[in-house]
Image: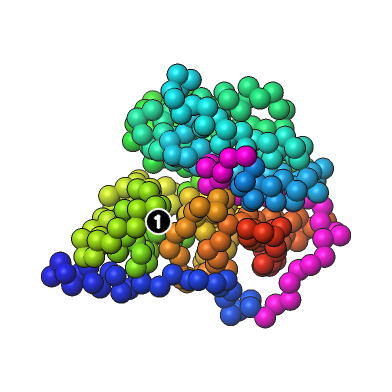
Amino acid sequence: MKKILVLTSLFINACSIRSVYIAEEIGNRAPIGAVDSVSYSIFLIGDAGEPMPDGEERILTVLTDAVSRRSKNSTLIFLGDNIYPAGLPETDRSDRREMERRLSEQIAVGEQSGAPTYFVPGNHDWDRQGSDGMQAILRQAQFIAGKGLSNVRLLPADALPGPSYIDVNDNIRIIFIDTQWWLHEYEKPLYRNAASEDETKTQFLDSLSQLLTTQRTTLVAGHHPLETYGEHNGFFDWRDHLFPLRHLSKYVWIPLPGIGSLYPLSRMWGITQQDFSGSKYGELRHRLDSVLSIHRPIAYASGHEHSLQILKPANGFHYLVSGYGMKSHSSALRTGEGTLFARRAPGFMRLDFFADGRVCVRVFEVSENEDGTEIFSMMLR
């Protein structure tokens, strides 16, 4: 019976998408090329926390140029996992300097472009969801603040779940949330007037509901997706079953047929709270969606999944997954109900807000030898 389960899982999850996927319902639409009437832009990139040294991470170079061209009318958001593998360590650790470099490479995008730049915490920033998580987040915030750049911040602050918000102008609001706070199983702070974690969660949701009750077009930004069709929703391709040690190191290509399927199967069965199968993640998705589906922001943007996805759920707002911020990333990806666009390639997204109230999302892919190429665009409203 166990062999049957393993083989069934292997064949069901065998094929990741290899090229750009665009849903048939929008595949024939003309691209949105004109930007003359764009009044504001928000750039979205996640999981960029292990850039190659000496400026070799092409995606950050391309991103800097793209943001700089619109710096007076744009915001940049790093969607978490800003430092791989386990956040910013103590100052006496031997790897401290390298972790500072990894974060500084991203901070430099905001410094050089001059655009307002915000970092959202991810699970790797919380000590890879470990026991030193809260302190690691506080250290990261202190390091960013220590750069003395008025346009670069980590939000939410103080290792709290948020919500924090920025009113970009009279028409746009960005709400920042720390989703890892919900999933974290070690020490974490509570609201001052909350006696328990449950009270903090309730107050958080109430505050989020109030912030969403606005005439402004609202974007909610967090690290963990509320919908995805990658490995965090239980999809693994044949490489994950045959070469499971790649998840420990991308260089370990040791075939383990049969036994290798134990890793993806354990992920599907809830071994980690970083997957949809985890109980805490299930609660996070349910409770956030219950608020967002009532007030309906223009989109919920996240990273965590190493892919580029645009998903249209039944509750009336879009899910944007922009978590391929490093070229070394590679994760399995399929399509599902509601998938409008999907791509496994390094890149980032940009939300364009038009003067007449329309909102467009654009997807940019960054290859080895070329500048960022716009590979998809569609109107969200």
In the rendered image, the vertical position of residue 19 relative to residue 123, given as above or below: below
**Is the residue 3 above or below the residue 164 in the image?**
below
Say which of 286 and 380 sits in front: 380
The structure residue drawn at horizontal position 56% and vertical position 36%, both measured from the top left corner, is 102
Q: Is residue 302 visible?
A: no
Considering the whole magenta stretch, tell me its main secondary structure: loop
Q: Quadrant of residue 322?
A: bottom right
Left or right of 119? Residue 224 is left
Q: Choose between 19 and 157: the one closer to the eye.
A: 19
Q: Residue at x 54, y 72 (%)?
A: 19
* Image coords of residue 64 (percent x, y): 72, 45
Position above or below: 26 against 106: below
What residue is drawn where x is 66% and y is 25%?
147
In front: 259, or 310? 259
Q: Is residue 216 magenta?
A: no
Viewer can see residue 330: yes
Extent of the magenta region: 28-54
Q: How many marks?
A: 1
Q: In the displayed image of the protein, which residue is found farthest to the top?
A: 92
Query: Which amino acid type corresponds to the residue marked 1 in the rendered image?
Result: His
Residue position marked by numbered label 1 in the rendering? 232
Residue 267 is left or right of residue 125, and the answer is left
The quadrant in which residue 353 appears is: bottom right
